[in-house]
Amino acid sequence: MTNSNNISGESLLYLTDKQLRQGIEAMFFAYRGFTADPDRILEEYGYGRAHHRAIHFINCSPGTTVNNLLNILGVTKQSLNRVLRTLVEDTLVEVKIGTRDKRERNLFLTDQGYELQERLSLAQSNRMRQAFKNAGPSAVSGFKTVLEAMMDPELNKIYLNLREAGK
Amino acid sequence: MTNSNNISGESLLYLTDKQLRQGIEAMFFAYRGFTADPDRILEEYGYGRAHHRAIHFINCSPGTTVNNLLNILGVTKQSLNRVLRTLVEDTLVEVKIGTRDKRERNLFLTDQGYELQERLSLAQSNRMRQAFKNAGPSAVSGFKTVLEAMMDPELNKIYLNLREAGK
DNA sequence: CATAATAAGTCAGTCTTGTTGACATTGTAA
DNA sequence: TTACAATGTCAACAAGACTGACTTATTATG
């Protein structure tokens, strides 16, 4: 199956099953690490990853609408609503009726919500910073390039829009 | 693109919040793409990602025990058992009582199970192959380096063991 | 103005997949 | 033999995803 070993000059353009399998497993295990630290914090609040995702993207785009969030997160209205309701009840998220269109609801983090966002972001960033440091600059560049190539085209657009929006 | 990205030669050794946030979002969106293709196949069978993971690692280590699988997957015995039971009922996985220790159960894919594994693996590999091709060899190397640095140490050990085992 | 379309929220029911607790079986050691 | 540990199974439950149907405001269109 594997005709050549991965040491010394095996061309990565000729991708073996083994290399691809390793890539798959790397994604699997790394994603676990990626979510581990925030998960521990969320547990204190009785929240899950769904809450984290909502908080993250409301923070990125303050005043975003429910519909916009649905597109980004790729979940159903009912699923997001359950999460948003608890966040509003716990006064981490504030909902304001749209000024331009009164049907819309604009979402903002409260100070309390921002505080949790900072905690989550810090925990996740710390691990990523460490990984980036260990791997070095060129590895970071490669990391992002591959991930971007792995996204669905529509999600890539959303991702790039967020990049713009975040200055 | 190589040593400095973005505007004005921002060094990647000095990691800004923005760079870290982009990394976080890249992981989020890429993981969605990573699982999208297998998910569609699994739906045909009424299976979920849990089934995929079990099939993947049984394929990697034929004859593995339930306990070993638990360590790799990081779920509870009961959770895995439900998944395994359906796979056995559907004759995708075969369970053999351990020869050395009769308490143990050794897990194998049947021909049918191997067939599904191939389909899933192919779908996921195709996307990864495409991403690797688009990104180029050095990016692939960086991708793996960062992911490995992002894993929990224990998971990294398991990951490396699988690498060895897979020849 | 009447009607359709849109944004958001809700209710009910289902599914996957995780959890805990209790229990059965097998193997080993006192 | 009896006690204990390792392993695997069963039952019940919860989070969080889903679909589908429905309501309420608001806006857009005929």
Image (cartoon, coloured by chain):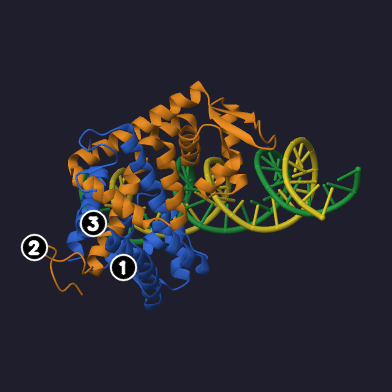
Chain colours: A orange, B blue, C green, D yellow
**Disc 2, SS:** loop
Residue at the (49%, 63%) spot, across then down: B47
- Mark 2, Cα crowd under 10 Å, few <14 / some 14-19 / many 20+, is few
Indicate the amino acid at tag 2.
Answer: Ser
Indicate the amino acid at tag 3.
Answer: Val
Q: Which mark is residue B140?
A: 3
Q: Residues at marks 3 and 2, common chain?
A: no
Q: Residues at marks 1 and 2, common chain?
A: no
Residue at the (58%, 45%) spot, across then down: A79
Q: Which residue is mark 2?
A: A8
Query: What is the chain identity of the residue bearing mark 3?
Result: B
**In this picture, residue B66 sits left or right of residue D27:** left
Indicate the amino acid at tag 1.
Answer: Asn
Residue most extreme to the left: A8
Residue at the (62%, 45%) spot, across then down: A78
Q: CA distance from mark 3 to mark 2?
A: 15 Å
- Mark 3, Cα crowd under 10 Å, few <14 / some 14-19 / many 20+, is many
Q: Between residues A43 and C8, which one lies in front from this camera angle?
A: C8
Query: What is the chain identity of the residue bearing mark 2?
Result: A
